[in-house]
Amino acid sequence: MIYALKRVLLGNPLTTAQARYERLAKIPALAIFASDNLSSVAYATEEILLVLVLAGTSALSYSPPIGMAIGLLTVIVASSYWQTIHAYPSGGGAYTVAKDNLGTYPGLVAGAALLVDYVLTVSVSVAAGVAAITSAFPVLYPHRVALCVGVVLLIMMANLRGIRETGRIFAAPTYWFILCLVILLGGGFYHLLTQGAPPLSTTVPEREPLNEFLVLRAFASGCAALTGIEAVANGVQAFKPPESRNAGITLAWMAFILGSSFLGVTFLAYFFHIVPVEGETVVSMLGRQIFGSSWVYYMIQAATAVILILAANTSFAGFPMLASMLGKDGFLPRQFANRGDRLVFSNGIIILASVSSLLLVIFGGSTHALIPLYAVGVFTAFTLSQAGMVRHWWKERGPRWRPHAAINGLGAVVTAAVVTVIGVSKFVHGAWMIIIIIPVLVVGFLAVRRHYSVLARGLSLEGFSPPKLGRHPVVVLVAVVRRSCRSPSWSWTPPTDRCSYQFSTT
């Protein structure tokens, strides 16, 4: 009965030979890898305004220049990752690039930072999606935590069915959201051209003085818009051949849509004098002012809620792949490197859903409580990845290596500055937890690797003396010969006695 239920929910098992047919074309790939990045349009501007409004209504005029700075940062980071995709066609995520060029420890820091970011991406995206729903239907607000957990479980089930089927499921909602963004931005700028900007209707008293630190905090909050931009580089091998070309085109599409949409929403929020309030998102307030409570407003809210929820799917594509790499290298349990019946890394998917649901329960499904934890990990990975690429070009010294190194060097410097700003400005708001969690994860990776090293020494045939052959030997074909010792596998010293030898024919 359990097996039959599993087949109904997940589908029939796939053979390994079918893996090459599970690859993605550019259109469904954009839906899978860009949903997180594109969905940040729905909350990145709001996070900027929530910080600036602490200095009163007049401080909101700083949102357009902050938005332009983040737009420029998007171009720099996307250009850097475009180079990474072509330099590492087998999949050049931050972990691989940093480990190959900077060493094991920087690679593990990048891997830990990305794992944390993927978990927070699921939590923040789902919480923001549910917030869009409760903005339109306030009666659901008290049940937001249960809604969040239920959504995570549904996305987990969809991903357990396989990557190609996930692309089919999520392609239509992603392009629906892009269409709704076009309608929102087009309607907003048309309103400004024909009717002008509405008068300022709400003023907020100053609670904190406006200074450079507050502006930096607003910039750091808005940098959440860039999260997910690395997902394409991490999953190059999920694309159909030619992998690098298709992945690069998808990344360019994603960066253009993100930059134009984010800047459009930021400028409209400024011209329409949007002041963030509890219980309603900035996109919702923009939609009400432009279209009123019409069906267009509810369509935009529905599309926003769906894309925010589906944004978590980017992590369900990236987290299992990264965990499988760490598992193959012996830094995570090797079970993470095993594929399930549907040729996806099922263990990574299940672990990601479990940890993300726990975070949503702990933080009460609040986007604003989770955002301070969000960007530290991803920009740490950005910095290490770009620094690793500079070292890569320096070692390779191929054609035009200096311009390539300059682009990645600029990306490394800028993202290092951003992660410093985020770490300092958001330290007391929760960033300290991520600064502690990343080293703890690295120590855990090293402990797992040490366990496998001890186990390998215990099973090795080093020092084995082959028995003397008799007059009539019998040849038995075996695939593996290993030593089996009664010492516990968790021992920190290799066993040297009480060993027998095992032979496997498979």
Image (cartoon, rainbow, N blue to C red):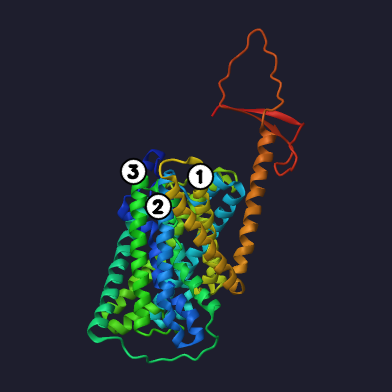
Question: Residue 195's x, y, as percent?
Answer: 24, 86
Q: What is the secondary structure assignment of the residue under circle 3?
A: loop
Mark 3 burial class by Cα count in 10 Å: few <14, some 14-19, many 20+: few
Question: Residue 1's x, y, as percent?
Answer: 45, 52
Across the whole image, how many numbered discs are drawn on residues? 3
Whole-Å distance between the Cαs marked 2 and 1? Answer: 18 Å
Identify the residue position indicated by label 3 in the image.
242
Whole-Å distance between the Cαs marked 3 and 2? Answer: 15 Å
Q: Identify the amino acid type marked 2.
A: Trp
Q: Is residue 375 above or below residue 245?
A: below
Q: Is residue 338 visible?
A: no
Q: Earlier in the sequence, mark 3 or mark 2?
A: 2
Whole-Å distance between the Cαs marked 1 and 3? Answer: 26 Å
Q: Report the residue at 73% width, 30% height from top.
A: 499
Q: Quadrant of residue 472?
A: top right
Q: Identify the amino acid type marked 3.
A: Pro
Q: Is residue 401 visible?
A: yes
- Name the outermost residue toward the top: 471
Identify the residue position indicated by label 2 in the image.
82
Which of 285/136 is in front? 285
Question: Residue 414's x, y, as percent?
Answer: 50, 62
Q: Label for residue 394?
A: 1
Q: Report the residue at 44% width, 63% height from top.
A: 312
Indicate left or right for 469 with 198 as reference. right
- Name the outermost residue toward the left: 194
Q: Identify the amino acid type marked 1.
A: Trp
